[in-house]
């Protein structure tokens, strides 16, 4: 129903513009007729001037002869051309038709007609919340700037984070910069300062931002944020190979699924496409010698379901493959059993305990691993 009313409104608006233009532009104006009419007006004007004594009769006759000669010459031109109204009118008509069609096509592709409207009262509340937030932010800044000791680090960081959340990256960078020279400045302070500058400059890494990144990497060479944004600087400097290698190397040293790994893989594939490298996936960086623990599952919570499942399944598969070559690794079988339990694969866990059963025979009676395997085997029978 909405589309029907929208179409009718568009049609009415277009018609209100197009119909008057078409009415004015239906005829063609003859160049000969318009020129002759103008020259005849000039003849009439000469007669009036002579009658008022403004020109002599001889001058009047000479001017009239010249004008009549022009009338005869113009009369030989029988061509007709569209008037300016006609040619310009059709351009307006065409625009009046194409613009609504283009707008409708764009709306159908990116619009959301099913999105519920927001009540005006709700928007008033939203504006009140925004105004209150801005007032509190300004109050905090005023208090920090008035502090004779420069304001506490925690206060400046709170202010900077508030600016980051609303996209005021210039103010955020300024707030972060207040703590960088302090003794308690951390790796995160330098990377967040650099991030604010990079976001301010639409992804470009300025020399100031790069110096902050270099400082963060001096403090912690493997910090993900510093490495991630440093790769931007390398790529922008033309060293795509180094940018790609930096990301891949850090992925390779990860000891489990981490939220930042998805961004690293995506960015590495962006560089890799330029270098002609095969696509990477999170599963390529699953640790080969361990199974996923509860902590690993929690660490993968921010990944998509597909990425998380692929990562964990790859870890389990690699551990299971290693145990085929090293079947006497009791701790490995127990780890694999726990991994299957985490994944909800009871059959896989039961098989892992069965593989571990021969390895507990020589364990002392008080060894907890012996009890664990026996209890799970008994429970599965």
Image: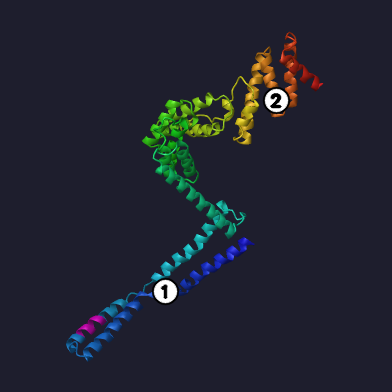
Separation (CA) of disc 2 from disc 1: 85 Å
Q: Circle 2 sits on which residue?
A: 340
- Position of residue 193 measured from the top left corner of the image (x, y, whole percent): 43, 37
The image quarter containing residue 43 is bottom left
Magenta span covers which residues? 61-67
Q: Is residue 174 above or below residue 114?
A: above
* Residue 65 drawn in magenta: yes
Rendered residue at 24%/86% (across/down): 46
Q: Circle 1 sits on which residue?
A: 28
Q: Is residue 232 visible?
A: yes
Please state, as top left, top right, bottom left or bottom right, where the N terminus lies in the image: bottom right
Please state, as top left, top right, bottom left or bottom right, where the C terminus lies in the image: top right
Q: Nearer the viewer, residue 53 or 126?
A: 126
Q: Is residue 330 left or right of residue 275?
A: right
Q: Main secondary structure of the magenta part?
A: helix
Q: Is residue 192 above or below residue 350?
A: below
* Colour option used: rainbow
The image quarter containing residue 59 is bottom left
Q: Nearer the viewer, residue 59 or 71?
A: 59
Within 10 Å of the Cα at label 1, are there few (<14), some (14-19), or many (20+) other Cα atoms? some
Q: Nearer the viewer, residue 37 or 114?
A: 114
Q: Is residue 325 left or right of residue 177?
A: right
Q: Is residue 287 above or below residue 24?
A: above
Number of the front mark, 2 or 1: 2
- Position of residue 138 measured from the top left corner of the image (x, y, whole percent): 45, 48
Q: Secondary structure at mark 2?
A: helix
Q: Residue furthest bottom?
A: 51
- Position of residue 329 measured from the top left corner of the image (x, y, whole percent): 67, 13
Rendered residue at 26%/85% (across/down): 45
The image quarter containing residue 7 is bottom right
Mark closer to the chain start, 2 or 1: 1
- Position of residue 375 measured from the top left corner of the image (x, y, whole percent): 78, 19
């Amino acid at each position: 129903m909405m589309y029907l009313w929208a179409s009718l409104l568009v049609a009415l608006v277009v018609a209100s513009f197009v119909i008057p233009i078409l009415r004015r532009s239906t005829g063609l104006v003859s160049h000969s007729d318009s020129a002759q009419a103008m020259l005849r007006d000039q003849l009439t004007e000469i007669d009036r001037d002579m009658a008022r004594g403004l020109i002599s009769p001889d001058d009047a006759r000479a001017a009239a002869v010249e004008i009549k000669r022009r009338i005869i010459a113009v009369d030989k031109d029988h061509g007709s051309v569209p008037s300016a109204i006609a040619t310009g009118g059709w351009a307006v008509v065409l625009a009046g038709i194409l613009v609504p069609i283009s707008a409708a096509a764009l709306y159908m592709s990116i619009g959301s007609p099913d999105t519920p409207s927001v009540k005006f009262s709700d928007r008033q509340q939203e504006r009140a919340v925004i105004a209150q937030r801005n007032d509190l932010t300004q109050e905090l800044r005023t208090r920090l700037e008035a502090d004779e000791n420069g304001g506490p680090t925690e206060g400046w960081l709170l202010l900077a984070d508030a600016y980051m959340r609303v996209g005021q990256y210039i103010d955020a960078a300024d707030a972060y910069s207040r703590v960088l020279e302090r003794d308690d400045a951390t790796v995160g302070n330098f990377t967040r300062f650099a991030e604010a500058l990079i976001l301010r400059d639409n992804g470009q890494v300025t020399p100031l931002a790069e110096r902050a990144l270099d400082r963060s990497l001096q403090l912690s060479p493997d910090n993900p944020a510093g490495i991630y944004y440093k790769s931007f600087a390398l790529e922008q400097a033309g060293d795509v190979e180094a940018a790609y290698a930096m990301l891949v190397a850090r992925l390779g040293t990860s000891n489990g699924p981490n939220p930042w790994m998805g961004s690293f893989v995506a960015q590495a594939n962006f560089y890799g496409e330029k270098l002609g490298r095969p696509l990477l996936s999170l599963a390529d960086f699953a640790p080969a010698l361990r199974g996923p623990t509860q902590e690993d599952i929690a660490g993968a919570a921010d990944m998509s379901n597909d990425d998380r499942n692929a990562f964990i399944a790859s870890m389990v598969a690699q551990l299971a493959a290693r145990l085929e070559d090293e079947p006497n690794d009791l701790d490995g079988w127990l780890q694999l059993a726990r991994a299957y339990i985490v994944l909800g694969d009871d059959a896989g866990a039961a098989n892992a305990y069965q593989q571990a059963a021969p390895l507990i025979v020589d364990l002392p009676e008080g060894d907890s691993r012996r009890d664990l395997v026996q209890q799970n085997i008994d429970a599965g029978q």
